[in-house]
Image (cartoon, rainbow, N blue to C red):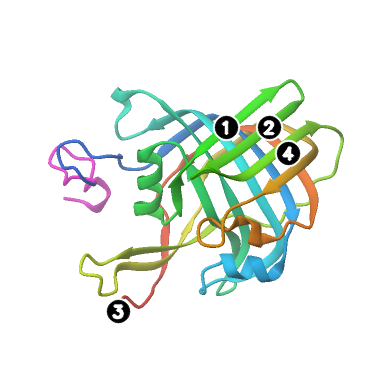
Amino acid sequence: MATDDFFTSSKAAPFCGPDRSPLYKPLPRLYRDLRKLSVFARGDMEGIRKALPAEFEPASDIVEFFVMHCPIVHDDADPIMGPRAYSEGGVVLGARYNGMLGGHVAYEFVTTDDAMCGGREILGYPKKFAEVDLAEDGKTIEGTVRRLGRDLIVASFEETEAPVEKPVLQPRLQVKRIPRADGKGYDVNQVITIQVGSANILERRVGKATLSVGGHPHMDPLFELGVREIVGAEFIVGEFDLGYGEVLQDLPRG
């Protein structure tokens, strides 16, 4: 069986568990008409270093806080099921790895189990369940991420003519770690890069924003990023295709 149809031919192996009805399907995943609010804020470099894996170096003190609703998500490998929807929010940090510049998703929160597990197990995104809401009212937009009874991200946006300062945040740079079942190291410990395909911005608005960041020292400590100054905000409607990533390095597993 050729590598490119290992999970897609009629005799394919199960993509993930359970075998009879896998939780998520092979990539690519097609995102259409997504709606995303991003607030860019200057943060504290010590907090940014804490949030980055040790393998990465910080590349900017500007942090992206985002809240996004994805109303149409197609699994290309299983079109008969039709599109699904979910929402997500999180934090992206400018990062550098062996001279490669990109963005590291340090915190990510989603509303469905397949979005969470697929992102974690395939591409190393640090996804967790949370309550995520994006509310639009004319030129005003509000985004919230709430988990375990705590507000993690509360952002409001008002459309105005305003500059937006953004760091380089693509491609993504992630560390994928999967512990062994016996607790003796990792089954997988890799540095991965991901680049979305067919990205297209259908609509873009800029504006001013307010931002509140919370958490707890022992769980989702987003506040450690130390928001100092908002340097811009934007709202986009867009689309992209999410395919597989590339393994940049296998790290020690013991």
Q: Residues within 10 Å of mark 2 (few under 14, many from 20)?
A: some
Residue labelled with disc 3:
254
Q: Residue furthest left?
A: 11
Q: Amino acid at mark 2?
A: Glu
Q: Residues within 10 Å of mark 1 (few under 14, many from 20)?
A: some
Could you say which disc has been placed on residue 197 in the image? none
Q: Is residue 66 left or right of residue 162?
A: left
Residue labelled with disc 4:
234
Judge whether residue 35 is colored magenta. Answer: no
Residue labelled with disc 2:
142
Q: Amino acid at mark 3?
A: Gly
Quote the CA–CA distance across marks 3 and 1. Answer: 40 Å
Q: Is residue 27 left or right of residue 155?
A: left
Q: Nearer the viewer, mark 3 or mark 2?
A: 2
Instruction: Residue at 73% x, 39% y: name it.
Output: 234
Mark 2 or mark 1, which is nearer the start of the sequence? 1
Quote the CA–CA distance across marks 2 and 4. Answer: 12 Å
Up-down relation of residue 203 to residue 64 (above or below): above
Quote the CA–CA distance across marks 3 and 2. Answer: 44 Å
